[in-house]
Amino acid sequence: MQTSISKLEQAADQLHLTMHSTTNNTSSFEEIKREIQVLKGLFLGRSQFPSIPQTPPKIPSWQLEKAEVHSI
């Protein structure tokens, strides 16, 4: 994931150089840069996700076999 983010940043830098040499359209570059920062926050922000619970699996009570009681 880190490599894909750095590839995106490199692509954004190349795009910026190309755009800067041809036109002065810096607002598009800034928009792309903001989108990359948002993606980095989504991919790398582990604090926003809850931790995995460490409880052992349990069979629900409705799936357990009930002991049959026979009266004589």
Image (cartoon, rainbow, N blue to C red):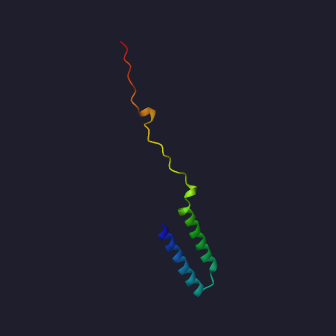
Residue 30 is situated, as x and y percent measured from the top left of the image, at 62, 75
Which residue is depicted at the point 38% across and 19% down?
Answer: 69
Labels in figure, total: 0
Q: Is 52 in front, or is 24?
A: 52
Horizontal side, residue 68 vs residue 10: left or right: left
Image quarter hosting the C terminus: top left
Residue 46 is situated, as x and y percent measured from the top left of the image, at 55, 58
Q: Is 27 in front, or is 33?
A: 33
Residue 32 is situated, as x and y percent measured from the top left of the image, at 58, 73
Q: Is residue 32 above or below residue 19?
A: above
Which residue is depicted at the point 57% across and 81% down?
Answer: 16
Which residue is depicted at the point 39% across and 29% down?
Answer: 65
Horizontal side, residue 61 vs residue 16: left or right: left
Q: Is residue 38 above or below residue 55?
A: below
Horizontal side, residue 72 vs residue 46: left or right: left
Horizontal side, residue 66 vs residue 48: left or right: left
Looking at the image, which residue sits at the far front?
Answer: 54
Which residue is depicted at the point 44% across and 41% down?
Answer: 57
Looking at the image, which residue sits at the far top?
Answer: 72
Looking at the image, which residue sits at the far bottom?
Answer: 21
Residue 12 is situated, as x and y percent measured from the top left of the image, at 55, 77
Q: Is residue 20 above or below residue 47?
A: below
